[in-house]
Amino acid sequence: MKIQTSVRVDNTFYNEAKEVFSKFGLSFGDAVNIFLAKVSMEKTIPFELSIPSKELESRKKNLDDDKNTQVYKTSNELFEDLGI
């Protein structure tokens, strides 16, 4: 027996995910059913969930504040700066 349900999803994530699913020949519903089947079989979320570390939070704040950041136009510029 199947049931119908609805979910609210971010439009950008939905559209980008649908593009990926279509490359596998899957509909959005197919992909959701695969996710639910995996959760049901494994009794867990089938990917790692974590809380960002303090270091990651600090780096994100630096990026948001445009502080202690360096932007490179090319990978060669980065490698040169790193002395590689």
Image: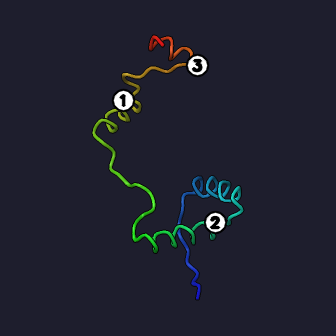
**Vertical placement of 39 versus 2: above or below?**
above
Of residues 41 and 63, the one drawn nearer to the viewer in this rendering: 41
Question: Mark 1 or 3 closer to N-term?
Answer: 1
**Vertical placement of 25 versus 68: above or below?**
below
Q: Are marks 1 and 2 in contact (CB under 8 Å)?
A: no
Of residues 44 and 53, the one drawn nearer to the viewer in this rendering: 44
**Vertical placement of 71 versus 41: above or below?**
above
Image position, residue 20 (x, y; %): 65, 54
Label drawn at residue 62: 1
Q: Secondary structure at mark 1?
A: helix
Q: Secondary structure at mark 2?
A: helix
Amino acid marked by disc 3:
Thr
Question: Mark 3 or 2 closer to N-term?
Answer: 2
- In 3D space, how far apart are the residues under numbered discs 1 and 2 (Cα atoms)? 37 Å
Image position, residue 7 (x, y; %): 53, 70
Image position, residue 64 (x, y; %): 40, 33
Q: Residue at x 62, y 70 (%)?
A: 29
Question: Mark 1 or 2 closer to N-term?
Answer: 2
Residue 54 sits in which quadrant? Answer: top left
Amino acid marked by disc 2:
Phe
Q: Residue at x 69, y 59 (%)?
A: 24
Label drawn at residue 28: 2
Q: Secondary structure at mark 3?
A: loop
- Residue highlighted by disc 3: 74
**How crowded is the residue under tag 3: few (<14 C-alpha within 10 Å), some, or many (20+)?**
few
